[in-house]
Image: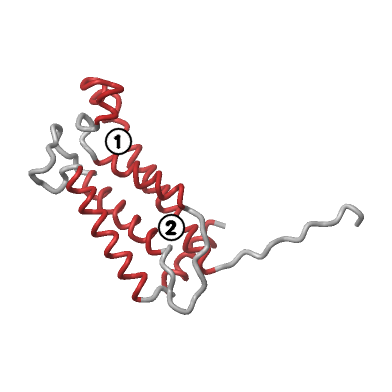
Amino acid sequence: MLFSYLSDAAQALRMWGARRILVAIAVAVVSALVIGVSTVLIPNSFFARDIPAVWWDYPMWILTSALIGLLTATYVREPGTSAPDSGGGTFGTVGGMLGWFAVGCPVCNKIALLVLGYTGALTYFAPLQPVLAVLSVILLLVAVVVRLKGQFSCPVPIRERSAQA
């Protein structure tokens, strides 16, 4: 069953036109810039980071941005086709937010800082960040696969049997 989903998703990706590909690239770049600047993975003068980034922050940041770009492009309508079906939005939203929390500075996160304090953020939130990163990628990947599968295969409604039969 998983192979069927992945196969349909890959088939849908191969059918993408230039419009969707350009949107995927543009959104991936913009999300990489927004996440990178706000979490100071891209050094800048607007934000500061108290705790240096760890090695896995960079691949997770790029992977999250690429998946956000792909997911967003699934909502783009190609000329001459019907509007894309819905689905995957909640997983995508939660996955994107978790990705931002995962690569951010644990003590620069105002929510973690208010709830746990400086020491608590380092003690409890920082060790959870790799888990948040994995959950983020899984949720975004599920959302992308569901959206792509929906573009390639259209489910047929099942007729209900009548009570008299």
Identify the mark nearer the N-term, 2 or 1. Answer: 1
- At 51% from the left edge and 55% from the top edge, which residue is drawn? 87
* Residue 103, quarter of the rendered image: top left
- At 37% from the left edge and 48% from the top edge, which residue is drawn? 137
Secondary element at image label 1: helix
* Residue 25, quarter of the rendered image: bottom left
- At 41% from the left edge and 50% from the top edge, which residue is drawn? 92
Marker disc for residue 144: 2
Residue type indicated by callout 2: Val
Circle 1 packing at 10 Å, graded few (<14), some (14-19), many (20+), is many
Give the residue number, with chain letter if any, for mark 1: 129
Secondary element at image label 2: helix
Location of residue 75 in the rendering, given as x and y in whole percent from the top left corner: 43, 63
Location of residue 99 in the rendering, given as x and y in whole percent from the top left corner: 31, 44
Location of residue 115 in the rendering, given as x and y in whole percent from the top left corner: 30, 22
Quadrant of the drawing holding the N terminus = bottom right
